[in-house]
Image: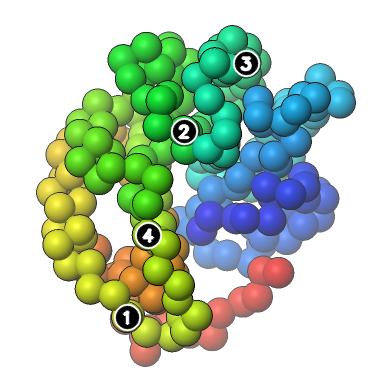
Amino acid sequence: MEVDSTYHATPAEHVITGWADRVPAGFTFALKLPQELTPEARSGPADPAALPAFAERALLLGAKLGPILVQLGPEFAPEQWSAIEAFLAALPSGPTGPRWAIEFRHRGWVGPKLLELLAKHRVALALVEGSMRGREQMIDLAIHPTTDFAYVRWMGTGRKIEDFSRVQVNRDRELSMWAVALAALAARVTAVYGYFSNHFQGHAPATAREMQRLIGLEPVEPEKLGSQTSLF
């Protein structure tokens, strides 16, 4: 599960432990780094200890913590290279630290220099299917992971969808292409974290089940699920 709320603020300790208590073993949360802690923040974090503090808070999830996602907007351009270098060098990591993924929305970032830097710090480049990125470029990057896990996001393409109760957009071709890419990627990493937006086809759970079928996994159909616990 990708958690959007953490992009706006660091959750309280009891909130994090509550999430962990409410989900079964094997469930993982991918937390978004608060925007104020990203290198895009205009003035940077007010407290230099804020980034380590967030990482420490996230680690309260234990085995239920997936990667932490750093999202950068389209205005954050490659001219800010020194900010990225400093940010990656400051990330709390190591054997007991969290795993990190980073999403660049400005098209000028992705290239050999960036991939080398990410590999140096063992940070995953978030691969995004959506209107801001070319699919061919993203799929090509899937066979060049920068660490031992991968992070993939399937977003919308600008079409306005308001009813999220059913699939409304045919993306069979895109899903088939990505299924092949995921097979190649899975041979190069130990884990692939993938997240679908409702805006991709209209109903993210159905899309996720279709992708599971395409890559040879057995999806859990809705009728076999019990009542779900509310997290928020």
- Of tags 4 and 3, which is closer to the observer? 4
Query: Quick one: label 3 or label 2, which is nearer the N terminus?
Result: 3
Q: CA distance from mark 4 to mark 3?
A: 29 Å
Real-space Cα separation, disc 4 to disc 1, in angstroms: 13 Å
Q: Kindly report which numbered mark, 4 or 1, lies closer to the viewer in this rendering.
A: 4
Q: Does residue 205 appear in this view?
A: no
In this figure, which residue is indicated by the disc labeled 2?
A: 106
The secondary element bearing badge 3 is classed as helix
**Residue linked to disc 4:** 157
- Badge 2: few (under 14), some or many (20 or more) residues near its Cα, within 10 Å? some
Q: Is residue 217 left or right of residue 47?
A: left
- The residue under label 1 is 168
Disc assigned to residue 83: 3
**In the image, which is nearer the foreground, mark 3 or mark 2?**
2
Q: Earlier in the sequence, mark 4 or mark 2?
A: 2
Q: Position of residue 226 (x, y in %)?
A: 48, 84
What is the spatial separation of the Cα atoms under label 1 and label 3, in whole angstroms?
41 Å
Q: Which residue occupies 36% across, 34% down?
A: 149
Q: Which mark is residue 51?
A: none
Spatial CA span between label 1 and label 2: 29 Å
Percent x, y of residue 155 = 41, 57
Do we see residue 12 in this rendering? yes
- As helix, strand or loop, the secondary structure at mark 4 comes to loop
Residue in view at x 34 percent, y 71 percent:
201
Using residue 70 as the reference point, say whether residue 47 is left or right of it: right
How packed mark 1 is, by other alpha carbons closer than 10 Å (few <14, some 14-19, many 20 or more), is some
